[in-house]
Image (cartoon, helix red, strand yellow):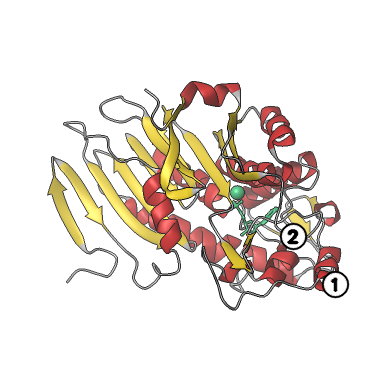
Amino acid sequence: MKTGAEKSLQIRNGCKEKRSMASGCLRKVAPAVFACFMGILFAAGCGARVPRYEALDTAMGTVIRQSIYTREEDITAEVEYIIETLEKSELSWRLPDTEAAKINAAAGRGEPVMVSDKLYEDLITLLEVSQKSGGAFDFTVGPVVQLWNIDEWAAGEQADAVIPDKEKIAQALQNTGYEKVVMENGGISLSEGMSLDLGAVGKGLACDRIAVFLEEKEVYGAVISVGGSILTYGKKPDNTPWQVGIINPEDTSSMIGTLSLKGQWCVSTSGDYERYVMVDGVRYHHILDPATGYPADSGIRSVTVLCQSGVLSDALSTACFVLGKEEGMELVKSYGAEALFVDKEGTISMTDGMRDIFRETGEY
Ligand code: AMP
Ligand code: MG
């Protein structure tokens, strides 16, 4: 009997295609499902000799779409497992035994919590992005994210959404601030009341971990989307570039254009359409300005960042959303990354490197 995660296995046009769907979670992530479908264009055909395995699952509260070319066995279930393990043992602040939850539980005790080398390295990267963005990206924004109840939001109207009082926001802000994080010798400690929120980078981190795994498995080529972060890896058998679509924030059923990429890249997008609530006609989205405690209002509707590190592309896309176009461009350039901004008027702006690989919808 097939498991819930493996509904069918088909051979089509010489490609092996597995469709898998974790049961029960799709209602909550429905907008993300659509976004992911739009995010990667799987239009490419299969090379004659390298089989393609495909999978569609949910993890990390989002949709995971995989397309892997390999002459070896199907590894899509292992990729899914890597993402679930990352969430359940390292990143989630809600589950008691994760590394993030242990760091949060020890806040104010003065004793550093030792974390794995990998996570320590990633947290150092994130602390640096916090510093270089002047706190526009701040992984200690947790108390304010929890106050807004962002984890419960899907995309769209929510009748019972409550906008927190100004006083409560001011109070929660007292317990944020990357400057108060102490990191040394493999350990991290927070001041009392603080809590880490790695929601802005979990998907990018997943892309990094998956890339290491694909290398170990000697995969020929792959394109994998973890919600708003997409990993391209290796080659397509026909040697054409990977095509990654960028969603139109004004109409999320369409794309503003596509990126043509060869080799290993991470593409992360932060957009105000991903998670939000509408209250009295006002859109409150999930990317907060840590300076005010309110949804960032820099005139931007979405930012897409491209670089070779998933943790960086994901942190930078969030930072750029808060900073806006001018300061965001400066930040990405300082990392040698590329970015594309869509503002509230629908105007598209991008770095020079992005211009070389971006093709706007309808442009030939
Ligand atoms: P993303 O969609 O990648 O930009 O990440 C947004 C998520 O990161 C939110 O759901 C929050 O959990 C968290 N977050 C919101 N604002 C910030 C911020 N300014 N810095 C860091 N994390 C944030
Ligand atoms: Mg991000």
Q: Amino acid at mark 2?
A: Tyr
Label 1 crowd (10 A; few <14 / some 14-19 / many >=20): few
- Residue displayed at 85% across by 56% down: 180
- Residue displayed at 53% across by 52% down: 203
Image-based side of 57 in relation to 160, left or right? left
- Residue displayed at 73% across by 42% down: 323
Q: Residue 24: horizontal and vertical position, in percent?
A: 37, 73
Figure label count: 2
Asked which secondary structure carries label 2, the reply is loop
Q: Are marks 2 and 1 in contact (CB under 8 Å)?
A: no
Q: Is residue 71 visible?
A: yes
Q: Which mark is residue 167?
A: 1
Mark nearer the N terminus (2 vs 1): 1
Image-based side of 88 in relation to 13, left or right? right
Q: Residue 112: horizontal and vertical position, in percent?
A: 78, 61
Q: Amino acid at mark 1?
A: Glu
| 243 is higher (above) or lower (below) than 23 | above
Which residue bears the numbered disc 2?
A: 294
Asked which secondary structure carries label 1, the reply is helix
| 280 is higher (above) or lower (below) than 318 | below
Image-based side of 69 in relation to 179, left or right? left
Q: Which of the 4 quarters of the picture holds residue 335? A: top right
Residue most toward the bottom? 160
The residue closer to the viewer here, 120 or 50, is: 50
- Residue displayed at 59% across by 21% down: 352
The residue closer to the viewer here, 241 or 325, is: 325
The residue closer to the viewer here, 131 or 35, is: 35
The residue closer to the viewer here, 44 or 74, is: 44
Q: Residue 191: horizontal and vertical position, in percent?
A: 84, 64
